[in-house]
Structure formats: C-alpha cells, structure tokens
C-alpha cells in the first residue's frame, strides 16, 4: 500500500467501530458545516427494500479522512442541509456501486450529486473480475467485511449496535481505496474514462412507470399470448394492491414464478387451482379465492380489448451494416482482451450496431452518436475509422 494512502487510513482517522450517530437537525447542520470544508467524502446508504412495499433510505453513512458519521433519516426527516454538500463540485463524493444510491437519494430527498467517483466502476475499468465492496477491500487491504446484516430490516428502530458497526465499516475505507484506484487508472490512461462515466452516473434517476401496464416490467411477459397477458396483468394488479395494503415487498406476497404459472394455467375455480400445486396451501388459503376471481374477469375481456406486448421492431439493416458489425465486434473483443477489460464495458452491443449503421467517416461524425461517450471516440475513434475504411481489423 502506498505510504500516502496508509497515512490517510491511520493518521487521525477514527478506527475500529468509532463513529457517531446523527439523529436531529442540529447535529446534521453541524456536520454539514464540517463537510463544506472537505475536498473528499465517502458515502453509502442502507434501505429497506426487503421489508416494505415502498422502499426508503434508512441510514446514510458518510466519512471524511478523520471521522465517520451515520445519519438516521427516519429521525432527521429534513436533509436539506446536505443538499449543498452533495451539489458542491469542489467536493468529491466517493461511492461503491453508486447507481442505486444516486437514484435513492434523489427519490427520497431530491439530493443531486456533482463530482461523484465510483470505486466499483473504477475497479471494473481496471479489469477486476470481483468488484463487490467485500471483494475489493479484501484484495486491497486484506480487510474482511462481515455481511451478516446485509438483508436485515434497516427500518427497524432501535437498531442493534452491531448493525451500526456494519454500516460504518462499509464507508470507512472508501477514501483511501479511491486514492489507490485513481493512481492505477492514471497510470493506465483510463482515469478520464472513469471520470466521464461517473459524471453520467451522477445523473441517473428512479424509473417512472408512467401508468404503463404492470406486465411491461415483468420478465418473461413477452413470451405470453394476449389472453395470458390479460390474466398476468390482473394477477400483478392484485399482488400490487395486497403488497401496498400489507406494506410488504411484492415478492413476499407472491413470487414472479407463481404468477407466471397462474397466468399460463388460468384456473377459474379453486378445484382447478389446488391440485396443480400452483400455490402453497397457505397461499391458496389467503389468496386463492381472490386470484381465481381476477383470472375469471381477465378471461372475460373481449378479444379486441386484450393487451398487446410492446415489441421494438428491429431496425432494418441496410447492406453493409452486418459486415461492419462483425468487424467492429471482432476489433472490440481483441482490444478488450489486450486492455484486460470486459468487452461490454469498452463498447456495448447497442453502440456497435449504432456505429455500424451510422458508418462514420471522420472524428466529428462520432459527435452525432449520443450513445458514444467522449472517451470512447477520442481513444478509439481513429482505430474504428481505419477499420471501417480499410475493411479489415485495425
């Protein structure tokens, strides 16, 4: 470990299980004033998606090079004091696997983040295969994280002290980890790649269903016929209503596998339901009558009103495009192997097809491909242009 990083981890840092809880607005405001003077902070959070219908952030862990604090948003319900800190471009915010956290902070508190650095993404761009926080900390610092509380109910109060220790450990090493990763990325010439990817990541937002049918987001629905889709939609609506009523996550009411089996079998009576083992005895007792009724109603929907699964029409490829796709993919796979990177991280399939379709003739043409990031066309644009021009691998 570099001496500078080792010093950052040891000199002046709280160690072991040291941390402080923030449980009121006054404490939060005091901490926010401290954060305003920091040029780098580490962030993580815990949520309750395993236990409630609408998930929410239950803890926010934040660390500087010298302190670790755990904010309880269930008690400090107004987090406006943190908004300027997260929005300040002069302060780097280090996350590990930031996608979920960025979406959750915006969903619950309208917190927007500028100058984000994701240590998981950085590890991926360095070609690491195992990029969970536990794996990365074990590899880098020989630190083993205890993950026994990962699936606990973080909305319960009071939380046992060991759960706070667990939460604090997840954030404590992110700052020294980011220093190591940035050094290695800089040596490989990939730091600018990750910085741009992190900028994009900081703008992700929670998905909106826009009142679309529930089966649009159900895996496997596209393989069903229209009548089965109607049945599935009725079942999904029932499950959603029950989950909301009982304040449980969807999977704790009925699993996706159970709903798919019901949509295919379409039992219209309890005698039809029970012998097929479509539900457990307890589920049949609780939900059987209501599910059968939902199925019967869906079976009565007129043919012309049956739902249609939205299918994106594959773009019609003009002559020459398939060949260009193959050439770019072959080049991409070879380049990824040379760089020891996942090929999809370098250039994904959708972008390969877009480039092949656009058939760029100059570097400026890449600017007309919004899916292509600056680091991709600046680093590999000339090679791709040569490949397309010569009709052979560059």
Image (spheres, rainbow, N blue to C red):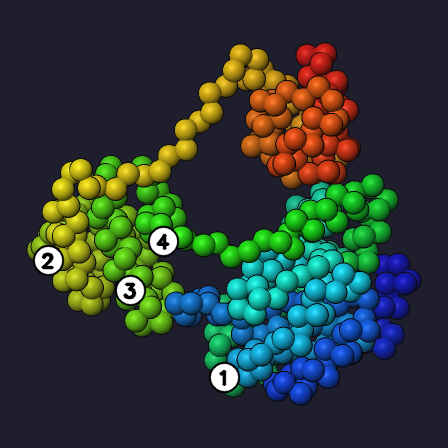
In the picture, the disc for residue 211 is 4
- Residue 360 lies, with reference to residue 175, above or below; the image says above
Query: Observer-nearest residue: 68 or 359?
Result: 359
* Residue 5 in the image, given as x and y percentages of width and height: 86, 63
Q: Give the quarter of the figure containing the N terminus.
A: bottom right
Q: Nearer the viewer, mark 1 or mark 4?
A: 4
| Other-residue count near label 3 (Cα within 10 Å), few / some / many at <14 / 14–19 / ≥20 | some
Task: Give the residue at the far right of this rendering.
Answer: 3
Residues at marks 2 and 4, CA–CA distance in whole angstroms: 31 Å
- Name the spot of residue 285 as percent of width and height, x first: 17, 67
Under circle 4, the secondary element is loop
Distance of mark 1 from mark 4, alpha carbons?
A: 34 Å
Q: Nearer the viewer, mark 1 or mark 3?
A: 3
Q: Which mark is residue 270?
A: 2
Residue on which disc 3 sits: 241
The 10 Å Cα crowd at callout 4, few under 14, some 14 to 19, many 20 or more, is: few
Res. 63 in view:
yes
Q: For this view, does 252 lie left or right of residue 63?
A: left
Q: Nearer the viewer, mark 2 or mark 1?
A: 1
Q: Would you name the residue on which mark 1 appears?
A: 157
SS for tag 1? loop
Q: CA distance from mark 2 to mark 1?
A: 41 Å
Determine whether, in the image, residue 58 is placed left or right of residue 226.
right
Q: Look at 74% across and 58% down and name the residue there.
A: 115
């Amino acid at each position: 470990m570099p001496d500078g990083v080792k010093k950052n981890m040891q000199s002046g840092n709280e160690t072991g299980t040291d941390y402080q809880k923030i449980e009121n607005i006054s404490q939060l405001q005091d901490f926010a004033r401290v954060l305003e003077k920091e040029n780098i902070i580490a962030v993580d959070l815990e949520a309750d998606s395993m236990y409630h219908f609408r998930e929410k952030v239950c803890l926010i862990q934040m660390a500087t090079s010298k302190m670790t604090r755990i904010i309880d948003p269930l008690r400090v319900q107004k987090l406006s004091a943190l908004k300027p800190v997260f929005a300040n471009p002069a302060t780097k915010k280090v996350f590990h696997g930031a996608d979920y956290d960025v979406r959750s902070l915006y969903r619950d508190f309208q917190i927007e983040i500028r100058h984000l650095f994701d240590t998981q993404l950085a590890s991926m761009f360095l070609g690491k295969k195992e990029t969970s926080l536990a794996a990365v900390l074990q590899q880098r610092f020989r630190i083993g994280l205890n993950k026994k509380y990962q699936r606990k109910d973080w909305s319960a109060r009071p939380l046992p002290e060991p759960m706070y220790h667990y939460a604090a450990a997840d954030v404590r090493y992110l700052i020294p980890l980011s220093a190591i990763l940035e050094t290695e990325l800089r040596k490989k010439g990939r730091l600018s790649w990750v910085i741009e990817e992190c900028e994009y990541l900081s703008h992700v937002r929670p998905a909106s269903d826009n009142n679309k049918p529930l089966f649009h987001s159900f895996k496997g629905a596209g393989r069903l016929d229209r009548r089965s889709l109607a049945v599935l939609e009725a079942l999904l609506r029932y499950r959603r209503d029950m989950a909301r009523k009982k304040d449980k996550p969807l999977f704790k009411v009925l699993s996706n596998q159970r709903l798919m089996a019901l949509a295919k079998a379409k039992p219209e009576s309890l005698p039809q339901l029970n012998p097929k083992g479509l539900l457990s005895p307890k589920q049949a007792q609780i939900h059987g009558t209501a599910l059968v009724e939902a199925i019967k109603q869906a079976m009565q929907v007129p043919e012309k009103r049956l739902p249609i699964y939205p299918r994106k029409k594959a773009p019609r490829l003009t002559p020459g495009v398939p060949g260009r796709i193959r050439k770019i993919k072959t080049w991409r796979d070879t380049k990824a192997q040379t760089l020891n990177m996942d090929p999809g991280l370098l250039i994904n399939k959708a972008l390969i097809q877009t480039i092949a379709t656009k058939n760029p003739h100059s570097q400026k043409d890449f600017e007309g491909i919004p899916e292509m990031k600056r680091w991709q066309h600046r680093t590999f644009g000339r090679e791709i242009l040569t490949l397309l021009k010569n009709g052979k691998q560059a």
